[in-house]
């Protein structure tokens, strides 16, 4: 079930990319902003969600650590760009929160799947 949560957060992050960031005179979404890390962030978080769904497809095996590694890579890039910017606004904060939540759940899903953390 945790892998499905990762997939749901991937969809949420993809949809957050279409939200307009209304600061100043120009109001654009992340896909039109022209900054590569912000345009790729929702897409790669969605990719991690798609990879997480792989275990639910018939005849497929568990996705393993791949969703967690993809989410970690893009979250680190988002966090470093957020710390380096001079306050990009609420939309960047939403991506850090939902990306961080996806990161934690993806690693928990992998740890449960690998048997490191025992379930009931």
Image (cartoon, rainbow, N blue to C red):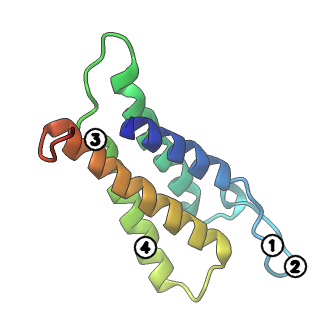
| Disc 3 to disc 4: CB gap under 8 Å | no
Q: Please rate how many residues cluster around mark 3, counting C-alpha atoms within 10 Å: few if below 14, some from 14 to 19, many from 20.
A: some
Circle 4 sits on which residue? 79
User: x, y (%) of residue 70?
Assistant: 35, 49
Q: Nearer the viewer, mark 2 or mark 4?
A: 4
Specify which label sits upstream in the sequence, 2 or 4: 2
- In the rendered structure, the answer to whether residue 79 lies left or right of residue 92 reads left
Q: Which mark is residue 25?
A: 2
Q: Please rate how many residues cluster around mark 2, counting C-alpha atoms within 10 Å: few if below 14, some from 14 to 19, many from 20.
A: few
| Measured Cα–Cα span from mark 4 to mark 1 | 21 Å
| Measured Cα–Cα span from mark 2 to mark 1 | 8 Å
User: x, y (%) of residue 84?
Assistant: 47, 84
Specify which label sits upstream in the sequence, 3 or 4: 3
Q: Nearer the viewer, mark 2 or mark 1?
A: 1
Secondary-structure class at tag 2: loop
The image quarter containing residue 54 is top left
| Disc 2 to disc 4: CB gap under 8 Å | no
Taking depth in this image into account, of 100 and 120 the one nearest to the observer is 120
The image quarter containing residue 51 is top left
Secondary-structure class at tag 4: helix
| Measured Cα–Cα span from mark 2 to mark 3 | 40 Å
Circle 3 sits on which residue? 66
| Disc 1 to disc 3: CB gap under 8 Å | no
The image quarter containing residue 75 is bottom left
Instruction: Please name the residue shown 25% across and 21% down the image.
Output: 61
Circle 1 sits on which residue? 22
Secondary-structure class at tag 3: helix
């Amino acid at each position: 079930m945790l892998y499905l949560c990762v997939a749901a957060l991937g969809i949420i992050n993809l949809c957050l990319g279409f939200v307009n960031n209304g600061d100043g005179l120009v109001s654009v979404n992340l896909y039109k902003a022209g900054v590569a890390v912000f345009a790729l962030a929702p897409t790669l978080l969605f990719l991690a969600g798609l990879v997480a769904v792989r275990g639910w497809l018939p005849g497929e095996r568990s996705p393993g650590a791949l969703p967690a590694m993809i989410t970690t890579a893009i979250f680190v890039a988002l966090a470093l760009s957020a710390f380096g910017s001079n306050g990009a606004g609420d939309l960047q904060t939403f991506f850090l929160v939902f990306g961080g939540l996806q990161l934690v759940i993806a690693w928990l899903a992998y740890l449960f799947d690998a048997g490191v953390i025992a379930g009931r």
